[in-house]
Image (cartoon, helix red, strand yellow):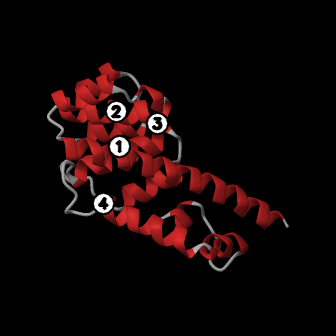
Amino acid sequence: MIDCASHLAKGGATQRLRQHRSKVVGATRGSWEALFSPALEGLSPAERFLVAIYACNLTPAPELAQRYRERNWADGIDDALMRTIERAERDDAVIRAVASQRQCALLRFTRILVDSPKDGDRAAVAELTQAGVSTPGIVALAQLIGFITYQTRMVAALGALEVLHAGN
C-alpha cells in the first residue's frame, strides 16, 4: 500500500531503497495485517475504515486515503458520513449531525491523536468508554491511528525521494 500510494516506480531507486530494509517492510505489512484482521477485537472493519480514511484526510495524505477507499470496506457506512470524513471535517457539530455517538467518539479521538497527540488524555479515553468502546477497542484504535500516521509519513518521505530520484 505504501509503495502504491507513494507512486514508486517498480524496480526504481526509491523502491529498491525501501525494500532494502526487509525487516521494516515485513513489520509494516504485519502491522497492517494485524490491525485490519477480521479477528481484531473491539472495532468493526467499517469503524477501522472510517478511522483510516479520516486520519489520512486530516494529515492530509490523499493518495493513502484513496488506497483505503479502494479496499471497499465502506459497506453500511452512510454517504453523508463518508463525505464528512473525506472533507477532513474538524467541527464536532458537523460530525454529530451524520454520525452515531460511537462514530463521533472514534473520529474525535482520531482527530486528537493526529492533530495534538498530547491531548489524548484520560478525558479523551473516557469519552470513548462512554460511547461504548471497550478497552481492547481503545487499544486497537490508538494502535491503528499510530500506524496510519506512520504510513502517512512514509508515503510523504518516499514520494519526496521518488521526485528527487526522478530529477536525477
Residue position marked by numbered label 4 in the rendering: 36
Task: Report helix, strand or loop for mark 4.
Answer: loop
Q: Residues within 10 Å of mark 2 (few under 14, many from 20)?
A: many
Q: Nearer the viewer, residue 8 or 117?
A: 117
Q: Nearer the viewer, mark 4 or mark 1?
A: 1
C-alpha gap between disc 1 and disc 3: 10 Å
Task: Report helix, strand or loop for mark 1.
Answer: helix
Is 87 situated above or below 166? above
Q: Nearer the viewer, residue 154 or 118?
A: 118
Tell me the number on the disc at residue 109: 2
Name which of mark 3 and mark 4 comes first in the sequence: 4
Q: Are marks 1 and 3 in contact (CB under 8 Å)?
A: no
Amino acid type, callout 3: Val
Residue plotted at (48% across, 29% down): 116
Residue position marked by numbered label 1 in the rendering: 142
- The answer to whether 127 appears left or right of 160 in the picture is left
Name which of mark 1 and mark 2 comes first in the sequence: 2
Q: Nearer the viewer, mark 1 or mark 2?
A: 1
Amino acid type, callout 4: Phe
Amino acid type, callout 2: Phe
Which quarter shows the C terminus? bottom right
Name which of mark 4 and mark 2 comes first in the sequence: 4
C-alpha gap between disc 2 and disc 3: 9 Å
Residue plotted at (54% across, 67% down): 24
Amino acid type, callout 1: Ala
Residue position marked by numbered label 3 in the rendering: 114
